[in-house]
Amino acid sequence: MESINSLQGQLKKVSEELSRQRVEFHQTKAYLQSILQNSNDMIFYTDESGVLSSFSRGGEKVLGYTWEEVAGRFIKDLTYDPPAFEKLMADSRDKESPVRTEVNFKHKYGRTVYFVVSLINLTNTKGQNVGTVGICQDITLRKKLQEDLVQIDRLAEIGRTTSGIAHEINNPLAVISEISGWAGTVVSDAEGLRQEDKEELETAVKRIEEQTKRCQNITRQILGFARYSEPAKTSFDINELLKEAITFLNTELKHERIKIVLNFGEGPLSIHSDPKILEQVLVNLVTNAIYAIKEKGSKQGRIELKTTKKGEKAEIMISDDGIGISQEDREKIFSLFYTTKPPGKGTGLGLPICQNIINNLGGDMTFESRVGEGTTFTVSIPIS
C-alpha cells in the first residue's frame, strides 16, 4: 500500500512537471512567434534541406514577399548567388559557432537588398541536423550611404580640380574669341571679295564666336554644378531656344539620316528662366537621342521636339525612336558617374547635371522608355 502511495506521488510530480514544461513550451513558442511577427530583421527557419519552414514579418517587409509566396521554397533561391549560399549553409552545419557574413538577396521587384546574415545550425538530442535559423539584418541603407560617400568624394575631387581646368580652358577660349572678333572686322573691311564670299566668311566667324561662347557657358555650368550659384533669369521664347540648340548639332546631324521634327504650338512660348543653362540641357538630351538612334543600328531615325503649355509650366518633350533604356538602367540613369556608353564615350555626368540644372530652375525632368522602340524625356519648367 505504501509503495502504491509512493508511486502515485511520483506520478503526480511527473504530471506536474509535464504540465509546467508544457506551459513553458507554449510560452516559448509564443515568444518566438512574437519575435517573428514584430522583428524588423528578416528571420527564417529552414529544414535540413534548406526549404523554408518559417519566415518573419520583417522578411516580408524588406523582400516584398508574403509568407504564402515563399513557403516551401529553398531560401537559396531568394539570393543572387544560390550555389554560394548553399555552401554557406553547409559550412554552418559543420561549425559549432554561428556563421556570419554579407549576402545579397533579391527583392520581389528585382532590386538588391543587402543583409548581414547569421546562420545557426539546429540539432536534435542525437546531434543530428534538423534545420537552420537565419537572422538577417538589412544593411541596404548603410551600403547606399557608403556608395554615396564614394561618389561624393569623387565629386569633391572634381570640384577641387574644376577651377584649374576652367582656367586652362578659358584662356585659349579668350584668345579664340579675340581673334574671331578681329577676323570679323577684317572680313567686313576687306576689299576685292565677292559678296557671296564675304557673307560666307562673316557667317563662319559668327559661328566661331557662338561656339566659343557656348564652350564658356559649359565651363561656367561645370563650375556651377560643383559650387551652386543662382541662375541668371531672363524672358525668352523656348521654341526659338530649341531651334538654336539644334543648330549646335548641325555638324553631327548632317552625316546622319536623322529627321528632326519640330512640333510647336501656335505663337511663341515665353518663359522667364536661364536660357543658357537650359540650352545646355536641351543640347545634352538631343545628343543622347542621336546616340540612341545610332546604337540601334537603323539606317534612319526620328527625333521629335514638342513644346506645350500646361498651367503655369512649359513642357518640353524630346522623343527618339532609338534603342531605348533597359529596366536595370532606368533605376540608375540619374546616378552620378553611371553611364551605358563605352569608355571614352560617356562620363556619367550628363544626365545628373541636367537634372540638377532643371531642379535649380524650379522644374523637373522625367522620362519614359521602351526597349527597342525609343525614349521620351520630358522637361517641365515654370513659366515665371
Image (cartoon, grey):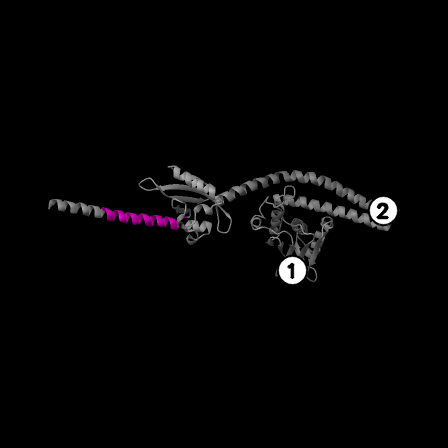
Q: Quadrant of residue 383?
A: bottom right
Q: Secondary structure at mark 1?
A: strand
Q: Any mark on residue 189, and which? A: 2
For disc 2, the neighbor class at 10 Å (few under 14, some 14 to 19, many from 20) is: few
Magenta stretch containing residue 247, yes or no?
A: no
Q: Which kind of residue does numbered mark 2 sit on?
A: Asp
Q: Any mark on residue 308, and which? A: 1
* Residue 146 left/right relative to 199: left
Tell me the chief SS of the magenta region.
helix
> Given the current orientation, which residue lies at the most extreme right position?
192
Measured from the top left, where is residue 99 in percent x and y? 41, 39
What's the CA distance linking mark 2 and mark 1? 45 Å
Measured from the top left, where is residue 160 in percent x and y? 61, 38
- The number of numbered badges drawn on the structure is 2
State the residue at coordinates (60%, 49%).
Answer: 356
State the residue at coordinates (80%, 44%).
Answer: 183
Q: Nearer the viewer, residue 77 or 12?
A: 77
Mark 2 vs mark 1: in front:
1
> Given the current orientation, which residue lies at the most extreme left position?
1
Q: Secondary structure at mark 2?
A: helix
Q: Quick one: label 2 or label 1, which is nearer the N terminus? A: 2
Q: Nearer the viewer, residue 202 or 338?
A: 338
Query: Which quadrant: the C terminus?
Result: bottom right
What stretch of residues is rendered in magenta? 17-39
For disc 1, the neighbor class at 10 Å (few under 14, some 14 to 19, many from 20) is: some
Q: Any mark on residue 79, and which? A: none
Measured from the top left, where is residue 82 in percent x and y? 47, 44
Q: Which kind of residue does numbered mark 1 sit on?
A: Thr
Q: Nearer the viewer, residue 94 or 378?
A: 94
* Residue 80 left/right relative to 310: left
Q: Is residue 103 visible?
A: no
